[in-house]
Image: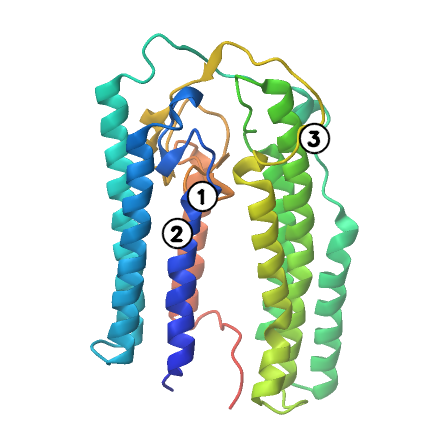
Amino acid sequence: MTSPIWLNLALIAFTAAVFRSAPALARPTLPFGVRIPAGRTGEPVIVLVRRRYNQGIVAAALLAIAAVLFAWLAPDVVLIGLVVACSLLGALAHRSIVAAKREGAWYAGTRQAVAADTSLRSDPVRPQWILLVPAGLLAIVTAAIGLFQDTAAFSTVFAQVLTVVLISLLAVAIPRARPEIDAARPSVSASRYREYLHGVLSLLLVSAGCVNATLLVVSLQLWEVVETSVPVTIVAYLPLVAAFVAWLAFSVRAGDAGYRLSPTGDEAETPYEQRDDDRFWHAAGMVYLNRNDPALLVHRRVGTYWTLNLGHPIAWLVLAAVAVAGVLAGTGVVTLPAKGA
């Protein structure tokens, strides 16, 4: 079935907004995934690169909207083209700053260091597991309704259980990821990062309940307990919308790795700059590979939240498991949730 034109336009606007906002949420010392000294954040070349990037995103979005309105290409092709164009703009911005950093020798004469906070290991941030209870209860309720309906279509229930399991694993793994500590102000940045982790873990557990609430309504439609209609579908996806808005608001308030949060104490700035570790980041700051880093998860430079350290052997096992799951789902061995007609 062809998607309504307003939905395609909304997806274009959303995609463009995500790409345009990502650099604004990043830490000032990581413009477009490039590590720079704190004293260089106001360089004219960075301001110019940001302006050109933003103009390019707007131009690409307008071209995509025109392509949909005048039916030049299929909407799916247009959306893919927009993602590719925005990604290329980000890569060009990354290369421009790398070149300026190299030519200007921005790190010349600086004292580089890496800071650590052992309290994040000895007294880690712990998930508030009670926030995961609604997700578990919704899965139990959905399973009970399915048994009462005497149906064999339990794919949504399996999806709910998988959501609880995956979110639980993430809630355990994220506090053990390598913390983002600024060598210039280690105590203050550690305090901010701890607060940031509290917010991320709480939102993560609450989001599991939002996902399972949506899957409950989808199950009721699939089993014909409620009719499949536009109002019911809107109600079904309201929890996901609420979760998205909450994540967006938190990301804007906290900033990348919590750098926008108010510090809980005062600290004199040290003479050190964060170590220039660009050599471990690839694909314009999207991919991290460092065999000497024991961390499995590291905070992303582009976008927000975490990514795998591809220098860690377990990272490849995780990717292999995801690939196997994708193949099984694609070949129909594993049935994905779907609404009935």
The answer to which quarter of the image holds residue 291 is top left
- Classify mark 2: residues with Cα within 10 Å, few (<14), some (14-19) or many (20+): many
Percent position of residue 159, x then y: 59, 67
Sequence-wise, which precedes: disc 3 or disc 1? Answer: 1
Q: Residue at x 27, y 29 (%)?
A: 98
Mark 3: which secondary structure? Answer: loop
Q: Residue at x 37, y 67 (%)?
A: 12
Are discs 2 and 1 less than 8 Å apart at CB? Answer: yes
Mark 2: which secondary structure? Answer: helix
The answer to which quarter of the image holds residue 317 is top left
In the rendered image, the quadrant that contains the N terminus is bottom left
Q: Residue at x 75, y 73 (%)?
A: 141
The answer to which quarter of the image holds residue 222 is bottom right
Percent position of residue 94, x then y: 29, 37
- The residue under label 3 is 124
> Amino acid type of disc 1?
Ala
The tag on residue 20 is 2
- The residue under label 1 is 24
- Classify mark 1: residues with Cα within 10 Å, few (<14), some (14-19) or many (20+): some
Which colour style is shown? Answer: rainbow
Mark 1: which secondary structure? Answer: helix
> Mark 3 or mark 1: which is in front?
1
Q: Is residue 184 above or below residue 258?
A: above
Sequence-wise, which precedes: disc 3 or disc 2? Answer: 2
> Amino acid type of disc 3?
Pro
